[in-house]
Image (cartoon, rainbow, N blue to C red):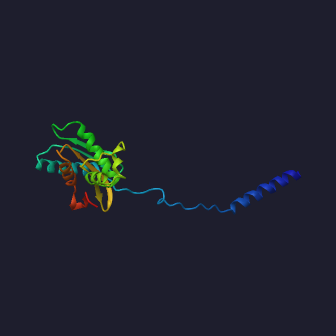
Amino acid sequence: MKSIFLFMLAISTACLGQTSVETTKSQLTIDPYIKSVNNLTLEGALELSKRATMTATLLDKKVAIALLDASGTTILITRGDGVGPHNTEAARRKAYTALSTKTPTLLLLRNAIANADTKNLNTLPELLLLGGGVPIWFKGTIIGSVGVAGGGSPENDDAIAKSVSIPEIGIMTTK
């Protein structure tokens, strides 16, 4: 009987003790874990490709065009009629190079040639130091990149790539 009484006393004390304990959880904020990123969309890539094609036509050139989003994922690749198939990969790699270095590839090429310390940049597997790759900016942030190949010269590819801005809404090929 004594043991039942002690058992009942212990149970009631344990129950009362638990109701008075407050549980506090630290409030976590999402900011350290999640970041919003502006990204070029398919619709944007289609418009930019159209603008690049118009510039190429003015130069009487047919080219391959690659557009990547801010993460380096390919959104769109086009190849003009009669353009060699190797140009699609060259355009993609130029776009990737411009995105990852945040520098137009023609400028990167010229800087690498002029500086012995950066001359070996062309040995990195994905980088392609040929004119025609340009980062695409929106409000000071890279949202993607464009690569152009097959325009007949590094200067033509560079000029076509730089023509893909939509200034009326702030999408530019310069910061």
Residue in view at x 77 percent, y 54 percent:
11
Asked whether residue 40 appears in the rendered view, the answer is no
Which quarter of the figure has residue 24?
A: bottom right
Q: Residue 108 location in percent, x, y?
A: 29, 53
Q: Is residue 23 above or below residue 130?
A: below
Asked whether residue 93 appears in the rendered view, the answer is yes
Residue in view at x 17 percent, y 47 percent:
53
Q: Which residue sits furthest front?
A: 116
Q: Residue 161 location in percent, x, y?
A: 22, 51
**Which residue occupies the foreground of this view, 122 or 97?**
122
All told, the count of numbered labels is 0
Q: Residue 175 location in percent, x, y?
A: 28, 61
Q: Residue 10 location in percent, x, y?
A: 80, 56
**Which residue occupies the foreground of this view, 135 or 48?**
135
Q: Is residue 120 above or below residue 141?
A: above
Q: Is residue 79 left or right of residue 97?
A: left
Q: Is residue 144 left or right of residue 19?
A: left
Q: Is residue 158 left or right of residue 4?
A: left
**Which residue occupies the foreground of this view, 123 or 160?**
123
Residue in view at x 84 percent, y 54 percent:
6
Which quarter of the figure has residue 152?
A: top left
